[in-house]
Image (tube, grey):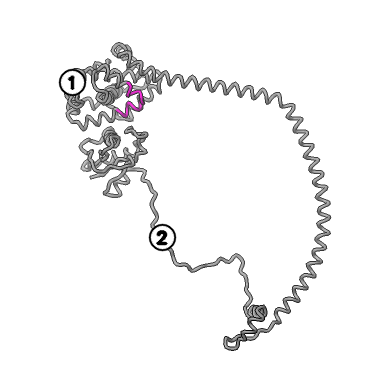
Amino acid sequence: MNILSALRDKIGPEQIKLLSGFLGENEESLAKSTDLSITSMLQGLLRHIEQGPGITDIMNVIRDGGHSGDILDDLKGLFTNQDKTQLLVTIGNNINNHFFGSTSSAVSDKVAEFGGIKKTSAASLFSLCSPLVLGLIGKQVKSGNMNQTDLSNLLQDQKEIVKSQLPPAINTVYDQKYSSSQSKVVVEKETVEVVEKEEVISKKVKSNSNTFGIFAWLLLAGLVLAAAYYSLRNRVATDTTSLNSNTEMESIATDSSMVSQDESDAFDNIQTTPSSSENIDESSVESKPVEATQAQKATEPAFVAKPNAEVVRNEPAKATEPAKSSKSYGNVLDQLGSSNSWASFSASNFKGRTAELKSSNELNSLAEFLKINTNKSLQISGVGKSRSQEDRAYAVRGKLYELGVPLSQLQIIAGQTSSDGSVKMKIE
């Protein structure tokens, strides 16, 4: 099968005319640039198999992205609707970022140069052609029940056709991408070899030092035994001295306890005279402050200490602020189902500041809900001053569309922008 010829049959003059109006380019230049974009995409996939992650990655993208080829059934109707066309560009941009990374912009620049269109138009056109190429390949995989080997053979059959029609300058862009990757592999391999050599040398040094190590351990053991002997002898002498000291201390403690008992009896015999504010002799208070203090202590009840008692203070209750919920809903459908307000599809689901989806797990359950509840529609908002927010809104709608939700249930609206880069959604 000739993939290039099959796609050229699908994208005829009517489709080229609609695309020229969408991008603002003349039809002749756009037709040439479209052919270059399709050829460049196929060459990128071939290099991805030979020097990149391989055929497994391509097969996973086709299956997970739902590229079954249905999109090719009515390209005229698709290109007539500019919103749908823009959505296709967003989906293709995510595909190119996955397969080619920053190299995709260099490829589109070459398409602009050889096709005679603006660089911005070439970038959009290259992105738009990517899902068309994957759609045609996915259709062959589905109809032929292909495995990875069959898919690899299908793409390898396109190699000579692509090579004969692709300008060498575009192929050079891919050469630079994968040559830098190979250089990294070589450097890593050389680093591993150096580390292994160092480990061998280290083992030899350790082997030569084993004899000296045994002697050192024997010497250390002798020193430890000697230190233990002298420590034990000093400890016996210390214990004898301590025993004599304890005997003397017990004698002193006995005498001290007798003195303390006499003082306690004398303190208990102190008599105090009830005080009256009318009979206080000011001169006696000023001249004998110590006696007054002792009399006051005698009249106070003895304080009995309670071990480990905790002091309880009757302080006024402090007003507590309501706890701030730190709960972050893990599923957008949970947020949409628990309230009628807008829900956020976090910016962390996108790669960096791009519109490429890093994780779409939260959208799976939402897609199932919308497919079951066909009377419901989802409003998606991200259209604001920031182009990245607009692309993210279209990327979310594109993913839901890939998961089987009709575009009639998906609406892009303005007015709910956010500074954190998230996409707002609401079920009507």
Q: Which residues are magenta?
A: 93-106
Count neighbours of disc 1 (C-alpha within 10 A) and say few if under 14, some if 14 to 19, many if 20 or more: some
Q: CA distance from mark 1 to mark 2?
A: 68 Å
* Residue in view at x 24 percent, y 16 percent: 5
Main SS, magenta region, reads helix
Quarter of the picture holding the N terminus: top left
Q: For residue 63, which quarter of the picture?
A: top left
* Residue in view at x 81 percent, y 53 percent: 238
Residue 334 in percent (x, y) is at 32, 46
User: Which of 261/406 is in front?
Assistant: 261
Q: Of helix, strand and loop, which one carries label 2?
A: loop
Mark yes or no: residue 415 visible. yes
Residue 258 in percent (x, y) is at 78, 73
* Residue in view at x 50 percent, y 21 percent: 187
* Residue in view at x 34 percent, y 20 percent: 45
Where does label 1 land, which residue? 26
Is 324 left or right of 225, judged from the image as shown? left
Q: Is residue 277 above or below residue 193?
A: below
Q: For residue 380, which quarter of the picture?
A: top left
**Circle nearer the N terminus (1, 2):** 1
Q: Which mark is residue 320?
A: 2
CB under 8 Å between discs 1 and 2: no
Mark yes or no: residue 400 visible. no
Q: Is residue 97 above or below residue 166?
A: below
Q: Which mark is residue 414?
A: none
Please identify, in this view, whether the residue under mark 1 or under mark 2 is nearer the observer.
1
Residue 329 in percent (x, y) is at 36, 45
- Identify which amino acid the numbered label 1 is placed on: Asn
Residue 214 in percent (x, y) is at 74, 30
Magenta-span inclusion, residue 97:
yes
Magenta-span inclusion, residue 232:
no
- Identify which amino acid the numbered label 2 is placed on: Thr
